[in-house]
Image (cartoon, coloured by chain):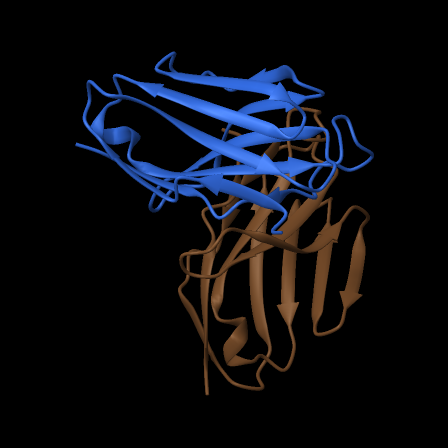
């Protein structure tokens, strides 16, 4: 069982569609994250959840809506996206926030999103 | 503008050589620094963390931190073709110990 599992691995959607990305971690961690990775750009932190509570929204447009029903699951609901939202969306987890040193993130394989 | 800058690369070294990856950061409040390795089509994985000035060695990898110069580096000794990947430098930012700022990454190719 891999540590952090993301589904779907690939998603193509139109600008008027509604879809969701799912992330599940099997590491017993209490913090979960969504990152966006675009070509030629640094990884961008989108959201952070700690013990199911959102602790960070990094000025993300409202067309991205996160949901964290428990410490093991994280969703990213997508609606009315734009072509520039096409990217690799990475889920990550860590032991907790704040941790002594919070950089030890465990990433999922990512969901490659294409918006037409 | 706060951020993490990496030498853009790509960097190509022969097998067995030392690969040197460099990173500078602008947030003087950053305390923790990390190197992640990302193979093509894969997710990033943590390979080194460093919190104090000086060197930290782990096998063939050595991370160096100089807070006065706001400089972080990663040395890979005896480079192997399997080290070919993009290396991401990250530092915590905004006084937070979990909000990481990543550099764009440096693509390393180790030629057999």
Q: Nearer the viewer, residue B70 or B43?
A: B43
Q: Nearer the viewer, residue B92 or B73?
A: B92
Whole-percent x, y for residue B16 in the image: 58, 86
Relative to A30, B35 lies left or right: left
Residue sitting at x 53%, y 36%: A91
Residue B88 against residue A65 in the figure, above or below = below
Residue sitting at x 63%, y 47%: A3
Relative to B17, B30 lies left or right: right
Residue at the outermost front position: A1
Whole-percent x, y for residue B95 in the image: 71, 24
Residue sitting at x 65%, y 30%: A72
The C terminus of chain A is located in which quarter?
top left
Q: Which chain is blue?
A: A
Whole-percent x, y for residue B50 in the image: 75, 50
Q: Nearer the viewer, residue A35 or B27?
A: A35
**Exactly how many numbered labels are in the figure?**
0
Q: Which chain is brown?
A: B
Residue A79 against residue B50 in the figure, above or below = above
Whole-percent x, y for residue B7 in the image: 47, 56
Residue B36 against residue B77 in the figure, above or below = above
């Amino acid at each position: 069982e891999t540590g952090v599992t993301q589904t779907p691995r690939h998603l193509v959607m139109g600008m008027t569609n509604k879809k969701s990305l799912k992330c599940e971690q099997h590491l017993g961690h209490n913090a979960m994250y969504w990152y966006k990775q675009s070509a030629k750009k640094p990884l961008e932190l989108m959201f952070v959840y700690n013990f199911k509570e959102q602790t960070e929204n990094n000025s993300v447009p409202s067309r991205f809506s996160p949901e964290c029903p428990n410490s093991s699951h994280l969703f990213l609901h997508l609606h009315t996206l734009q072509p520039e939202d096409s990217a690799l969306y990475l889920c990550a987890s860590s032991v907790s926030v704040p941790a002594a040193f919070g950089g030890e993130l465990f990433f999922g394989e990512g969901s490659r999103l294409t918006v037409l | 503008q706060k951020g993490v800058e990496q030498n853009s690369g790509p960097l190509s070294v022969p097998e067995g050589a030392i690969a040197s990856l460099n990173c500078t950061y602008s947030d003087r409040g950053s305390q923790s620094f990390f190197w992640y390795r990302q193979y093509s089509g894969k997710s990033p994985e943590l390979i080194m963390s460093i919190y104090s000035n000086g060197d930290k060695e782990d096998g063939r990898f050595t991370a160096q931190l100089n807070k006065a110069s706001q400089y972080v580096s990663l040395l890979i000794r005896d480079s192997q073709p399997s080290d070919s990947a993009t290396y991401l430098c990250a530092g915590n930012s905004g006084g937070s110990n979990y909000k990481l700022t990543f550099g764009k990454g440096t693509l390393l190719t180790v030629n057999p």
